[in-house]
Amino acid sequence: MSALSGFWITLRTIFRRSFTQRYPQRGKELVTAPRYHGRHQLNRWPDGLEKCVGCELCAWACPADAIYIEADANTDAARYAPGERYARIYQINYTRCIFCGLCIEACPTRALTMTNEFKLADTSRASLCYSKEELLAPLAVGMVAPPHERLLGLSEQEYFAGLPPTGEPDKRIPSLDIPRVPPTTARTKTSRKRGSKRGGK
């Protein structure tokens, strides 16, 4: 009886119209949900300094061991983040990443978030290991490319107090004659040739 009922389900559904959607042949871009877990992004403060403090909590939380970090100390001569440390090397191996989002929950400064970008397929394993330069958010209006001193306050307490909402320029940032790096989202050919300490794992 169970075999007959299985055949009946097959006969009942075999002539139904297929609802499979082909991509990208279907003619338009796929629209993801607002909270879709896509490619990671390292965020910046409103003056352009990096939010990542190199604590490595995201690497410890990753169940797939896909994140590799080497931290270094900030100095007044070369400051990349407002705190004591910054991530000198930050790599995510997308051949390992399972896009679970546990690294996002572990980040204490909201430095690491996930974008809606899902087109990560490539032709080699090495190109799927993203470096810090590829993961950093582009410079927005009012941001200055690091290294530079804190532009939102001389001390850490002044710096973190009263920041404006994300995406709005901060009026406390002075107009300095520091060259600004144009924002870019495309990966360059040179960045795809760099090696990785975990790329071959």
Image: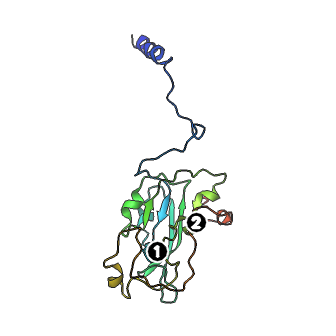
Image quarter of residue 171 = bottom left
8 or 79: nearer the eye? 79
Q: Does residue 158 lie above or below 65 as drawn? A: below
Horizontally, residue 5 falls left or right of residue 29, namely: left
Q: How many marks?
A: 2
| Residue drawn 51% across the image and 53% down it | 117
| Residue drawn 37% across the image and 63% down it | 106
Q: Amino acid at mark 2?
A: Thr
Question: What secondary structure is marked by label 2?
Answer: loop
One can see residue 197 in this view: yes
At label 2, counting other C-alpha atoms closer than 10 Å, the crowd grade (few under 14, some 14-19, many 20 or more) is few
Look at the image and name its color scheme.
rainbow
- C-alpha distance separating marks 1 and 2: 16 Å
At label 1, counting other C-alpha atoms closer than 10 Å, the crowd grade (few under 14, some 14-19, many 20 or more) is many
Question: What secondary structure is marked by label 1?
Answer: loop
| Residue drawn 36% across the image and 87% down it | 155
Q: Position of residue 86 (x, y in %)?
A: 47, 77
The N terminus appears in which quarter of the rendering?
top left
Camera-nearest label, 1 or 2? 2
91 or 168: nearer the eye? 168
One can see residue 201 in this view: no
Residue 194, numbered label:
none
Q: Earlier in the sequence, mark 1 or mark 2?
A: 1
Q: Position of residue 21 (x, y in %)?
A: 53, 34
Q: Position of residue 44 (x, y in %)?
A: 45, 71
Q: Position of residue 176 (x, y in %)?
A: 50, 86
Image quarter of residue 25 = top right
For disc 1, the marked residue is 50
The C terminus appears in which quarter of the rendering?
bottom right
Q: Amino acid at mark 1?
A: Glu
Residue 184, numbered label:
2
Do labels 1 and 2 touch, CB within 8 Å?
no
